[in-house]
Amino acid sequence: LDKALHSAGISYGFIIFGTNLTNPLNELLLALQPVFPLDYILITVMTMYFVMTSMAGIRNMGIWFFWIRLYKIRPKRTRPQALLFLCMILLLIVLHTSYMIYSLAPQYVMYGSQKYLVQSEAPSTDPVPRNVTFSTTKICDADAPEGKFRTASSHSTWAVHSHHKRCTQV
């Protein structure tokens, strides 16, 4: 919805330069991340929900190819080829869920709940110049200055945390 309302348009691929609407799933995953297994549990529950609802739909409708019914799913009477198709469909659903997490929770996947340190000079009314600075923390995002984060790479699709961009202090 945010892309449709606030993006640069179809000619630019609906790129969005800032979020105007909050993403509740993204916010929930960011809130759960500091307590280690809770974010993984939520992702597992989401994946299991998609798998279970898909299995229920396939069980009720059967396996179709466009308008042609290929197989019916029935207790104790399902053909082995139908079970093979069902397993393939469920594997594709799990693959799609692991791919779609990047679109569903972009802040969580790219940066996590990491923060970086910003130092700035304190305003002074004294006539004597002083070198007084104060530090504030900001959440990592695309507006972070160059060198404040680095991208960590991983070979595992399921290791969502390893894809976070790591914020470092410069």
Image (spheres, rainbow, N blue to C red):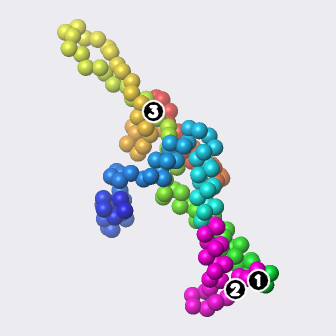
Answer whether residue 112 is magenta in the image: no
Residue 19 coordinates in the image, percent (x, y): 36, 51
Circles 1 and 2: CB atoms closer than 8 Å: yes
Q: CA distance from mark 1 to mark 3?
A: 56 Å
> Percent x, y for residue 87?
71, 72
Q: Residue 16 placed where, x, y %?
A: 35, 56
Towards the viewer: 124 or 131: 124
- The type of residue carrying mark 3 is Tyr
The kind of residue tagged 1 is Thr
Q: Residue at x 44, y 52 (%)?
A: 24
> What is the span of residues highlighted in magenta in the rendered image?
51-75
Which amino acid is tagged 2? Lys
Residue 65: tell me if it is visible: yes
Q: Around disc 1, counting alpha carbons within 10 Å, would you say few (fewer than 14), some (14 to 19), or many (20 or more)?
A: few
Q: How many marks?
A: 3
Picture residue at 51% right of the left edge, 56% below the top:
102
Q: In this image, 164 relative to 144: left or right?
A: right
Name the residue beneath numbered marker 2. Answer: 72
Dot 2 lies on which element?
loop
